Image (tube, rainbow, N blue to C red):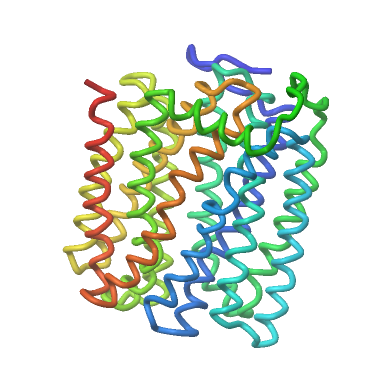
Amino acid sequence: MTTAVTGVVAPTWRGGFGRLWSAAVVSRFGDSLRTAAMPLLAASLTRDPVLVSLVTVCGYLPWLLFGLLGGAVADRVDQRRAMWSVDLVRGTLMAAFAVAVGLGHASIALLIALAFALTTLQTLFDNAATALLPSLVPAQALGSANARLMTAQQIVGGFVAAPLVPVLLVAGASVPYAADAASYVLAACLVASLRLAAPERPPRAAGATLRGDIAEGIRVLWQDRTLRALCIATTLCNIGMGALIATLVLQVTGWLGGGQAGYAAAITGYGAGSLVGGLLARRLADRIGRIRSVFAAGAVQCCCLVAMGTVRELGVTIAAMAVFGTCGMVWNVNQVTLMQQRSPEAMVGRISSAFRTLSTGGAPAGALIGGFVAAAWGLNTPALLAAGLFVAAVASLARQII
């Protein structure tokens, strides 16, 4: 069901979309607590940039190993059931980790193992969620639905969770992780409560295999000129993002001397900018088109990264992170909507997994490179490396807008 808002079709809050939105918000709140707290925990265990970056590397690596398989499975199973089952398992893992932290047994090795396990499960969850949304809202409302989902996630992640982490850490080092575990369980209950009929899929050909399904998804993605260009550009950006994210806590706390409060402020600035981006994404796409919106967002992000890597002022970094977040949300909303709209209904999971695997696969390499670059040439250099990669990404999209 949808409603028209100023000539634009928007999803209604009642029914399935409202519950899916609520589950996404709750889960992002918990994840943001963990995401903000874990780099601080890693930095307290070691000051070696390479070891810190390995936590980020293993948070992306499963996409290379299992991402394509997760998409093929998502197109074969009940996506709602897959999502709530995965969330229950992730909640159990986080609860166990919270106990380990509370007892003083945290280590870099444990952080790496947890990051790997959570992302392995995420490969199925994210592909199933991407494939499920078009069954809840019509194609013309996907842009609005994605914007509402992503904007709300950024609000709770950037405005609520990230600033709350220092307070929770005062209460106990394990508290952010225990809250994340609880958020997984609540999100699982919300997804399980969705009232959806079992997905109707055409019968598969005799002898159809997961390998064949995966190959078909890659082939369809690569044959679509727009999605292919967007995938290449996103891959380049994710290499840069991997380098930046893996060492950001060290850049802010070390190179800028901002401490934990400064790091939280930078993350909050990113969240604030993402909120603005969520409000602008659909309007910008309506005015100049989705692919041009992505191109413009990437061009501005290049400037933000240069500022972060050259100006040794915490305020400049916070402001740059805010603008960077605005453009990142514009990119993400339009990227996901394009993928959902241009994919055959029965192949959304596979095309989504092919896109994510190819594009996200650059992040672990970028994170590892970022760690070595920071160790060799300074904690600000990963931002400059990311800037160069974003320039290449924007250049690769130029043919789509000419």
Instruction: Give the total of numbered labels.
Output: 0
Q: In the current view of this chain or complex, which residue is farthest to the front?
A: 207
Q: Is residue 38 left or right of residue 51?
A: right
Q: Position of residue 146 (x, y in %)?
A: 54, 32
Give 2 or 61, whichever is nearer the viewer: 61
Quadrant, the N terminus: top right
Q: Say which residue appears at 66% left-offset and 54% top-offset.
A: 121
Q: Position of residue 372 (x, y in %)?
A: 31, 72
Please tell me whether residue 284 is drawn above or below residue 374 in the rendered image: above
Quarter holding residue 80: top right
Q: In the current view of this chain or complex, which residue is farthest to the top?
A: 7
Give 170 or 374, whichever is nearer the viewer: 374
Quarter holding residue 367: bottom left
Q: Is residue 151 left or right of residue 225?
A: right
Q: Say which residue appears at 75% left-offset and 43% top-offset.
A: 82
Please tell me whether residue 130 is drawn above or below residue 61 in the rendered image: above
Give 220 or 226, whichever is nearer the viewer: 220
Please tell me whether residue 340 is drawn above or below residue 67 in the rendered image: above
Q: Say which residue appears at 35% left-offset and 31% top-offset.
A: 229
Q: Position of residue 296 (x, y in %)?
A: 27, 33
Quarter holding residue 195: top right
Q: In the current view of this chain or complex, which residue is farthest to the bottom?
A: 104
Q: Say which residue appears at 55% left-offset and 46% top-offset.
A: 153
Quadrant, the C terminus: top left
Q: Position of residue 66 (x, y in %)?
A: 60, 51
